Amino acid sequence: MELLLVRHGLPIRRELKEGVADPELAPEGHQQASRLGQYLSSEHLDAVYASALRRAQETAAPVVEGRDLTLRIEPDVSEFDKDSSEYVPVEELKRTNDPRWQAMLDGTWEPGSESHEVFRERTVGAIERIIGEHRGDRVAIVCHGGVINAYLSHLLGLDNDQRGFFYPNYTSIHRVAAASSGERSVVTINETSHLRGSGLPMGLFQHG
């Protein structure tokens, strides 16, 4: 089967004193998601999943639109900060040299309550479960940068603490070929052709 792991679009900034932030997409994020949906419209998909967080579900909506599919929600591909009371796009942290950005660089920032080991077990387990349910299919999972890092670092045999070994751009596609024998092959990483020439933010250093 072919697996498409897709990062969500750009969310808004939300910082609460209590409760779960769970931000929606920013206007630019909706534009990114629309371009993603158009880009994938020529590809047959047998199923589309999204995490339980709003930014993932809103990104997945244009992918499902026009297909005879219902978006499936999989809570176990939610990000490590899923229960956090704040969400600040990492680009804002970098631009303002926020202490949290420095903590991300040196590996000491832990916004979630899960350990690296528990997070990887949860997310990798969920993705493998979806693969097992869709032999021979092409399936998209709209999720998060940390989830994509966890799964690809697992496939590449990297250390468990390499949760941020690379930066997935907004609405980037990461394709994996998954054989029923258990073999996994990374086909593409950070596929963002749909954002080229758009002027939309792509990631830390780029615009489309």
Image (spheres, rainbow, N blue to C red):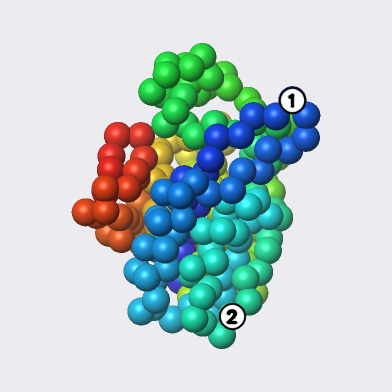
Residue visible at 26% across and 48% down in the picture: 199
Q: Residues within 10 Å of mark 2 (few under 14, many from 20)?
A: few
Image coordinates of residue 167 in percent, x first then y, are: 40, 39
Query: Residue at left 30%, top 34%?
Result: 205
Residue neighbourhood size for the residue with mark 1, other residues' Cα within 10 Å, grouped as few (<14), some (14–19), many (≥20): few
Left of 16 or right of it: where is 201?
A: left
Residue appearing at x 50%, y 52% in the figure: 8
Specify whether residue 196 is in view: yes
Residue located farthest toward the right when viewing the structure as drawn: 18
Residue linked to disc 2:
69
Q: Secondary structure at mark 2?
A: loop
Furthest residue in direction bottom, as rendered: 68
The reply, left or right, for residue 185 in relation to residue 82 is: left
Sequence-wise first label, 2 or 1: 1
The image quarter containing residue 130 is bottom right
107 w.r.t. 147: above or below:
above
Determine which of the numbered discs, if any, sits on residue 17 in the image.
1
Q: Is residue 102 above or below residue 15?
A: above
Q: In front here: 70 or 132?
A: 70
Disc 1 secondary structure class: loop
Q: Are marks 2 and 1 in contact (CB under 8 Å)?
A: no
Question: In the image, what residue type sits under mark 1?
Answer: Lys
- In this view, 83 is above or below 28: above
Q: Position of residue 164 (x, y in %)?
A: 48, 35
Displayed quadrant of residue 52: bottom right
Q: Amino acid at mark 2?
A: Leu
Reply above or below: 86 against 54.
above
Judged by depth in the image, the label closer to the viewer, 2 or 1, is: 1
